[in-house]
Image (cartoon, grey):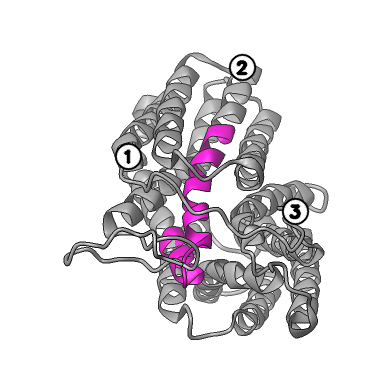
Amino acid sequence: MTSNARAPEPHDHAVHEAFGPDLTAREIIGTQTVGTMGLMVIGVTPMLLTALAREHRFSAAQMGESAMIETFVMGLATAAMGLIARPSRVKLIGALAAFALAGLDLAGLFAASWTLIALRAVAGLVEGVMLWVTVAMIARTATPERWAGVFLTAQTVAQVALVMVLTPLAPHYGANGVLFALAMTAAVTVPFALMCPDRFVPLPTTADGGTRLPVRGWVALAGIVVIVAGPGAVWVYLESIALQAGLSETAAHTAVWVVLALNIVGGLTATMMAGRVRYFTIFTITSIGYLAVWGLYLFHTPTWAFLAASAVQGFIGLLIAPFFVPMTIGADPSRRTAVQGGPAQLVGGALGPLAASWVVTDQDAHGVLWLGAALLLLGMIMVAGLRFTERHASPSIP
């Protein structure tokens, strides 16, 4: 399988691939950085949208519309690349995408309202291409959940770092300061894109030579969308839930930071557990954790208890994410479905808050907790169906 791989230098740290030649540390850094920088906007979205509304460049409704459209387009673009793009000229694709994203971010300095929304939609398209570079690499590794964990942890650390840098600067430079910072992160990605491998080995076709996803693959992707939508919906209203639980505004802000900090710990833990724990075990543990946390959120609780529950939510939020990869591989051993796992998470992240808007009011956000629980349980039913029929599934590759 790796007969066409170049012999790594003695100092290289090769990452073993299930499909194609092993990758060196330099190539891994390149592919991971391209995807990480393509998702930087997610970390600063609340800051950017709030600043745009304050400057009367966005209405309140346009804030939500812009965030949903950019994330949704990002997911669709990554999915389309995984389905139709040939995994060649990866360096060129990554570099051009990063360069284009920097230009789109800079163009946003002079735009407002629907013009800016259109620019962010095109930016989502380019960001999706950058994400494809990383998920294509992860899907081909021998331990994909480990590299998914590395990627998720890296992007969380990078987003938190950017937020920390911009927090004292944003009041002075406004939305354009955030957009300029995003442009700079995209621009510095170009040399990292040139560190990527030039091509990936194509994934296996189906038994009849086709490239379509099997039914089980589509069920796995639907499960990811639903499972991600639940916590995503709750996350958007976390501060509202905290205030309605009797916490102060400062404590509500603290809960958000606690979730982000424990995201990092959860991602690191998932990376260390990769290859040692079955995905269904992780899914079961995290589902119980989510339901317990959301149950506590329904009541007035001491600040320490709310923050402790938020810490649990942050930890399991990134603990579960890398294990979507082995779940999709179990459903579709060709790994074509695995390439679509990242886009499915983005779509779930966009649809969750949209669904939440139908069950909350200005006075009461607790409806989102029931919605999150229903979506989580529905997703687990799908995953359980895949897990307990796995041995009887027909193979997806010859």
Left or right of 303: which side holds 22?
left
* Neighbours of disc 1 within 10 Å: few (<14), some (14-19), many (20+): some
Labels 1 and 2 touching (C-beta < 8 A): no
Q: Is residue 212 magenta?
A: no
* Neighbours of disc 2 within 10 Å: few (<14), some (14-19), many (20+): few
> Which segment did they paint magenta?
124-152
Q: Is residue 126 magenta?
A: yes
Task: State the SS at label 2.
Answer: helix
Amino acid carrying mark 1 in the image: Leu
- Disc sitting over residue 239 in the figure: none
- Disc sitting over residue 212 in the figure: 3
Q: Extreme left residue here? A: 11
Amino acid carrying mark 2 in the image: Thr
Amino acid carrying mark 3 in the image: Arg
For the C terminus, the image quarter is bottom right
Left or right of 287: which side holds 180?
left
Place residue 7 in its image quadrant. Answer: bottom left
